[in-house]
Image (cartoon, rainbow, N blue to C red):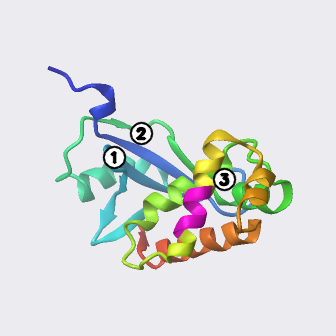
Amino acid sequence: MPKHPADQVVWRLGAIRIDPDMDHPELYCLILEGAKDRPLLCDGRILFFTELDRAEELIAKYGSDLPYDWKDLEKPFFHCDIAEALHALTEEQVDQNASILDAVNFLLDLVECSPVPMPASYKEILFKTADHCTFSKDMKALFEQSPFAPMDVVNAMLWCIGAIVVSATIV
């Protein structure tokens, strides 16, 4: 009997754009989406790559021991546009394209694989931000109701990026 789609484990592509002057992602990673999403690791480090067509090869080399139901590698499924999210937070305070929500959720998934413990205050800020962005694009409302400001979210995101970078490798 086939698994229900919600119970399936799927390899998916993640795309990361950091440079606001670039019009495409600079890095890619592979996420094993299931009950708990997790990135492909190489020697305990989060594996990033720059050439999209290497996904199959990297799963075969570093993820062949991980069970999955199917692969969705045609185009990125997860998007983490750091440049757009930071701009939306600091300049617009509107999450029009869900870039803040996508970036925060992506960073939270990846930082879980880092050996660096996340400060409780940053975790709280990012979870509250993600919860708010799930139901509203208006960031001003979040900051009016919360004890933290846009720069607190920026700092928490930058902390996550640092923790991920020290726990990553690019192949």
* Residue of label 2: 73
Work out which quarter of the rendered image holds the N terminus and state it. Answer: top left
**Vertical comparison of 44 with 65: above or below:** below
Q: Main secondary structure of the magenta part?
A: helix
| Residue 24 in sight | no
Identify which amino acid the numbered label 3 is placed on.
Answer: Ile
CB under 8 Å between discs 2 and 1: yes
Name the residue beneath numbered marker 3.
100
Please give left or right for residue 89 compared with residue 112 in the image: right
Identify the amino acid type marked 2: Leu
Measured in 3D between alpha carbons, the distance from the residue under mark 1 to the one under mark 3, in whole angstroms, is 29 Å
- Counting other residues with Cα less than 10 Å from the Cα at mark 3, is it few (<14), some (14-19), or many (20 or more)? many
For residue 143, what is the image quadrant? bottom right
**Region in magenta:** 123-128
| In this rendering, position of residue 116 left or right of residue 69 | right
Secondary element type, mark 1: helix
Q: Tell which tag, 3 or 2, sits nearer the viewer.
A: 3
